[in-house]
Amino acid sequence: MTINIPAHVGMAVEEVDTPCLLVDLDALERNIDRMASFVKENNLRLRVHAKTHKSPDIANYQIAKGAVGVCCQKVSEAEAMVRGGVRDVFVSNEVVNPRMIDRLAALSKQARVLVCVDDIDNIDDLDKAAQRYNTTLEVLVEADVGAGRCGVQPGEPVLPLARKVSKAKGLKFSGLQAYQGKAQHVHDFNERKAKIDDAANSVRETVEMLKKEGLDCDIIGGAGTGTYRFEGTSGVYNELQCGSYVFMDADYQRIKMEDGRHIDEFENSLFLYTTVMSKTKVEKAICDAGLKAQSVDSGPAVVYQRQDIEYIGASDEHGVISDPQNHLKLGEKLRLVPGHCDPTVNIHDWYVGYRGDRVEAIWPVAARGMCL
Amino acid sequence: MTINIPAHVGMAVEEVDTPCLLVDLDALERNIDRMASFVKENNLRLRVHAKTHKSPDIANYQIAKGAVGVCCQKVSEAEAMVRGGVRDVFVSNEVVNPRMIDRLAALSKQARVLVCVDDIDNIDDLDKAAQRYNTTLEVLVEADVGAGRCGVQPGEPVLPLARKVSKAKGLKFSGLQAYQGKAQHVHDFNERKAKIDDAANSVRETVEMLKKEGLDCDIIGGAGTGTYRFEGTSGVYNELQCGSYVFMDADYQRIKMEDGRHIDEFENSLFLYTTVMSKTKVEKAICDAGLKAQSVDSGPAVVYQRQDIEYIGASDEHGVISDPQNHLKLGEKLRLVPGHCDPTVNIHDWYVGYRGDRVEAIWPVAARGMCL
């Protein structure tokens, strides 16, 4: 990956090689500041999700602005964060592979490490590994509050897991993981809010049940960019896990606020930079960013601040841009807002950070491809 | 990427870390042999498309079995192939970025390098770079034979480009690029064949027009895994550019042959290996391969040789597998056939090659992310 860097510091943005990821540093910093203010005003903790950016450079900036640490989804992703200087990492996911449990235990000797469980036997495996490495792993029980993915049902099913964790010699019971992943991209405000109200009610009940058994939840974690105001003002969640707010993407920008307007509290700071590489047709242009430069799982990219043209199709190495007024020229560069930022970032090795029209930072996507 | 290798040679396949790419070496070799036989029987050349596998290890095996060289779609991808020992590389795409044109010219001092053009001014840029590096670039004019992407229209519009190339001091006119990308995945046999018949007719006409001007096409190139029998028996195409046949994928296997059966001449040799990481629900399981382990642009993955379960949904790091009979167990491993092999490969750093139940090779996806 070192041999294929699309820019150097000091370069004009216009000169940067494409396709690549551009980051508007001013917009990134404003996004980070806005979330930090919300968290401070509401007496919450923010544990930013590093699965979005996979960059210790960005994580360390978020921590400098008040975040307590990061979430990761994979052990190898957590390792990349610790290697980059982050000292508080929650793998907000289950880890069942014995080799990866070993790596998790080993990592906890270099940083505070937390992990989720939703299976009673998995607790034994984590405990044994922690003891083998003479360390302590912090554990949150994951409750499925509507996403239908990992986690046991909230309420009673959480209790035996929490009890077992609290009695395990190598483990510490640290709370409840209750992320409603399916609510984040629901476009309608009321529908989205209702899902989080439901989640918060079942979380509140579960936390009280645990308390009656003497099991206090240091962390009651969840929330994403689409719903964090709901969890953050629920009175029950105390640690928010937003990730996408740093960059935003086309799909997040389709969700609506209470007044029906599209969400606008965070700015686009991440762009897929592309060049028109073929212009043999009047009504369209071909650019150099296709499926190997972005993930189209949540719909196509949107051309930033251009109403006259539209990104309408992607093949492996090409994008088709409709150009009904024949405005585009061969060699012209465009900024695309990715349809879905997380899996798009996961394709690229580098961020090209810029301020104004000048490249200011080249950051590795250090945890790119860290899927183990 | 070096720190996160999912296997080692000699390991049992069952022990390999997930998610990762598995390659069935027996099936891969049989696929390569089958295409090599077709090409030999029909007196054609095969220039395999390396954009599928991005691996010099696989490319060199294909060349040992008779391929004349490789196609790439990007200059940086071509560099990775040359670095891996390939000595004949065609960038079957336009290169318009001045820095990448320089890299292309520099590369041609280490290997035979060919490139496409579809713009008259681009020919000057290529010529100047070649002269600056005291080298020769071979150039094919790209004709758009129905894909609606890059390339000028076949016939008359090809002539001025071919003439200019043939007169440029740093360039050599090497022929016509005529790939019908839109035909490859057309499921219906007759519809697919009709598109290639149209393409072949316009190519034949164009080649004759060029011949009248004294411009011989050493290479008349095109064809993919979905249509190669049509181009290969057209009497006009002489160099096939198939890529996906080495691996196959779920979408290619939906296309049909003349008798209405699904195409079956190539086998699945590429799998996305995944583990059941959460099993808290009776009717489904959650596996560890989501959008960051595959591209779902052409539909979801298919669970290999299992009729009882189905991969039904992907989020960033999770896959949902329906399990109506509650067969799956936590920790169980499954082979998925990716929906679309090329962009799925482009996410991963390693191939784990196996024969029988034993890991036999670990190959880097050397050109992964090489999108410049």
Image (cartoon, coloured by chain):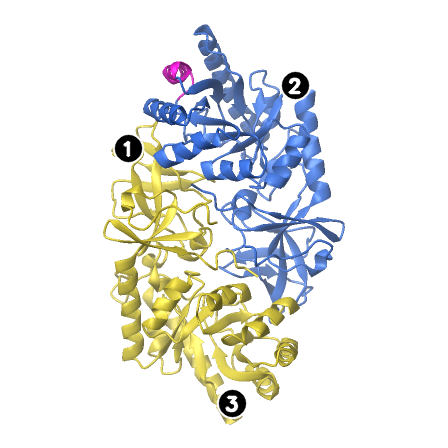
Chain colours: A yellow, B blue
State the quadrant of the N terminus of chain B. bottom right
The amino acid on which the numbered mark 3 sits, given as a three-letter code, is Leu
**Residue situated in front as seen by the camera: B87 or B4:** B87
Residue A22 x/y as whole percent: 34, 51
State the quadrant of the C terminus of chain B. top left
The amino acid on which the numbered mark 1 sits, given as a three-letter code, is Lys
Q: Earlier in the sequence, mark 3 or mark 1?
A: 3
Chain to which mark 2 belongs: B
Is residue A9 visible in the rendered image? The answer is yes
Is residue A227 visible in the rendered image? The answer is no
Q: Is residue A46 above or below residue B264?
A: below
Chain to which mark 3 belongs: A
Q: Main secondary structure of the magenta part?
A: helix
Q: Is residue B217 above or below residue A328?
A: above
Report helix, strand or loop for mark 2: loop
Report helix, strand or loop for mark 1: loop
The amino acid on which the numbered mark 2 sits, given as a three-letter code, is Asn
Chain to which mark 1 belongs: A
- Mark 1: give few (<14), some (14-19) or many (20+) Cα within 10 Å: few
Residue A175 x/y as whole percent: 49, 82
Kindly report which numbered mark, 2 or 3, lies closer to the viewer in this rendering. Answer: 2
Is label 3 on the same chain as label 1?
A: yes
Q: Is residue B272 above or below residue B103?
A: below
Instruction: Please tell me the numbered disc located at residue A215.
Output: 3
Is label 2 on the same chain as label 3?
A: no
Q: Are marks 2 and 1 in contact (CB under 8 Å)?
A: no
For the record, the magenta segment spans B153-168
- Residue at 36% of width from left, 83% of height from top? A235
Q: Where is mark 1, residue-wise?
A: A329
Left/right placement of residue A156 relative to residue B263 reads left
Q: Where is mark 2, residue-wise?
A: B43
